[in-house]
Image: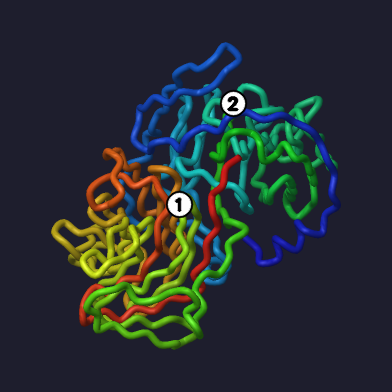
Amino acid sequence: MNPSISSVLLALAIVSAGCESKPQTPPVPRNGPATETVSSAEGPRSLKLIAPADADRPLTEPSQLPSDEQLRDGWISLFDGQTLFGWTANSETDWSVKNGEIVSTGPAGLLLTTSRFRDYELTCEVWLAAGGNSGLFLRTVLDPVDPAKDCLEFNLCDSHESYPTGSLVARQKSSSEQKIEGGWHKVIVRLEGDRCVAVIDGQPVLDATNEGFSQTGGHQIGLQQNGGEVRFRNVFLKPLGLEMILDVASLGDWRFAPGESDASVKADENAVRLQGTGYLEGQATYGDFVLQFEAKLNAKDVNSGLFFRAEPSTKEAPSNGYELQLQNTIAGGDRTKPADYGEGFGTGAIFRRQKARYVNANDEEWFAVTLVADGNHFASWVNGLQVTDFRDERQPDPNPRNGRRDEAGHLSLQGHDAATDASFREVRIAPLAFE
């Protein structure tokens, strides 16, 4: 990635195109096979989603992660260089990981993110065999049929007569004659509202604007296999449109939850430093969202957390919400073995629901966290690495401790015990409002 990506993209001119809309599709489960109902011209039908062979491969040492500068700018990795965790497939395509690359030779199909995103900047490197046909499917439904309605298909196919590499299929032809067959090439796409802008190897190839771009009905990201060998690596995403919600100096509308508390807060390192036992609760409520923040646990084995979709706090129940765990304790130096409670959950875990598959943060160092909450699907990233991919299948309940909460709720920062000493900064959020 390059810090000047946004300036390159925003320097391009605006062009427009047209399309129609269709109903949105739900988030998909990671563990397959599973079945989802999708729309088609003939009416609703079932689609079998398949977990790729490498989705649950143990992670030993993640690679292809954002740099420190990129983490501060909000980038996350969609591919850890070893596994296909966080992806699902809509066909029997032979998606696999080889030599740090996502590879496929056929048959046709999509590899889809299990998480949905609305506005973002996406970058990846792609290698396409001579005569190959691939693409990036943006805001896609699970099983797109008509690229003029179901998705934004950014084509990667030099030989396509009407919409060659760099085009949006059935929407707008590329302004360039960029060729990509037979070598590695860097692709950058920025999708914000009704505008889609793209660059390949630093050269502008597309700038398209149309009100239909936000009405495709889907919001997964898909890698396409449609003929010939294709490989992807260094797949990164930066969510757009997040706004700061925690003022370090004044705390804004954040206050301590009712009940006994020995917690205190102060401004330190341009951050809110929370010490002791208690819950610092924001008064705004959020349902589906992308949340990002930076945290530091200021001593060894500190226990803290961020609660979300929480019921309003009371003296008797100050923290009835989902908890994103923040504790970096591991067993025997093995980052795949968090050692905070029982069998362990670890930083980034959805506490008591799904453990973090890898503890990717250190005590006494700043680390970046991203949380996507979308319906009953939750995914988290720590220092750019996706560590959870959880779908809550419990029965609905206003209290997430007892069941699935779909309603909006409060955010709160946890002081777990007297030894808690945790700092938070750059707390920002964007609602996930899918049209």
The residue lying toward the viewer, choosing from 213 and 298, is 213
| Residue 1 x/y as whole percent | 62, 60
Q: Which residue is mark 1?
A: 287
The residue lying toward the viewer, choosing from 54 and 70, is 70
Image quarter of residue 174: top right
| Residue 400 x/y as whole percent | 29, 51
Name the mark nearer the viewer: 2 or 1.
1
Q: Residue 192, which numbered label? A: none
Q: Is residue 355 above or below residue 229?
A: below
Residue for point 62% across, 50% down: 119
Left or right: residue 385 versus residue 127 is left
Sequence-first tag of 2 and 1: 2
Mark 2: which amino acid? Pro
| Residue 223 x/y as whole percent | 56, 37
Mark 2 neighbour class, 10 Å CA radius: few under 14, some 14 to 19, many 20 or more: many
Residue for point 51% across, 57% down: 76
Mark 1: which amino acid? Gly
Residue sticking out furthest to the top: 42
Name the image colouring. rainbow
Mark 1 neighbour class, 10 Å CA radius: few under 14, some 14 to 19, many 20 or more: many
Residue for point 30% across, 81% down: 421
Q: Is residue 4 above or below residue 86?
A: below
Spatial CA span between label 2 and label 1? 27 Å
SS for callout 2: loop
Residue sticking out furthest to the left: 342
Residue for point 75% across, 33% down: 158
Q: Which residue is mark 2?
A: 144
**Can residue 220 be seen by looking at this rendering?**
yes
Left or right: residue 345 versus residue 431 is left
SS for callout 1: loop
Q: Is residue 59 above or below residue 103?
A: below
